[in-house]
Image (cartoon, helix red, strand yellow):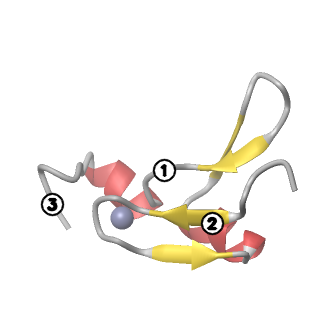
Amino acid sequence: MPYSLIAKCPCCDKTVNNDLNKIKRLFGLRTMKNGNEIPQSYCKVCRSKKCSPTDKRC
Ligand SMILES: [Zn+2]
């Protein structure tokens, strides 16, 4: 495994573990320069709200 397949949103604490389809749906993926795809650090909901751990908007 090039990376561990876990996504945890620091804002709302939503966590998805080893479920790529769910990660795609709830977090989305981003492609690194080396071609690896990693989960977005924030879930889609929090990104759209520009939420951060110190500024929770959920
Ligand atoms: Zn979130």
Rendered location of residue 48, percent (x, y): 35, 51
Mark closest to the chain's N terminus, 3 or 1: 1
Residue type at mark 2 is Ile
Give the foreground label among 2 and 3. Answer: 2
Rendered location of residue 40, percent (x, y): 55, 49
Mark 2 → mark 1, Cα distance in angstroms:
10 Å
Rendered location of residue 44, percent (x, y): 45, 58
| Left or right for 14, reference 7 | left
**Label 1 belongs to which residue?**
41
Mark 3 → mark 1, Cα distance in angstroms:
16 Å
Residue type at mark 1 is Ser
**Residue at horizontal 81%, vertical 39%?**
36
Mark closest to the chain's N terminus, 2 or 1: 2
Residue type at mark 3 is Arg
Mark closest to the chain's N terminus, 2 or 3: 2
**Label 3 belongs to which residue?**
57
Disc 2 on helix, strand or loop?
strand
**Residue at horizontal 64%, vertical 76%?**
17
Residue density around tag 3, few if under 14, some if 14–19, many if 20 or more, within 10 Å: few
In-front residue for pair 24/32? 32
Tell which quarter ligand 1 is in.
bottom left
Badge number at residue 6: 2
Ligand 1 is within 8 Å of the C-beta of the residue at disc 3: no
Residue density around tag 2, few if under 14, some if 14–19, many if 20 or more, within 10 Å: some
Disc 3 on helix, strand or loop?
loop
In-front residue for pair 51/10? 10
| Callout count | 3
In-front residue for pair 16/2? 2
Ligand 1 is within 8 Å of the C-beta of the residue at disc 2: no
Q: Is residue 28 above or below residue 36?
A: below
Residue density around tag 1, few if under 14, some if 14–19, many if 20 or more, within 10 Å: some
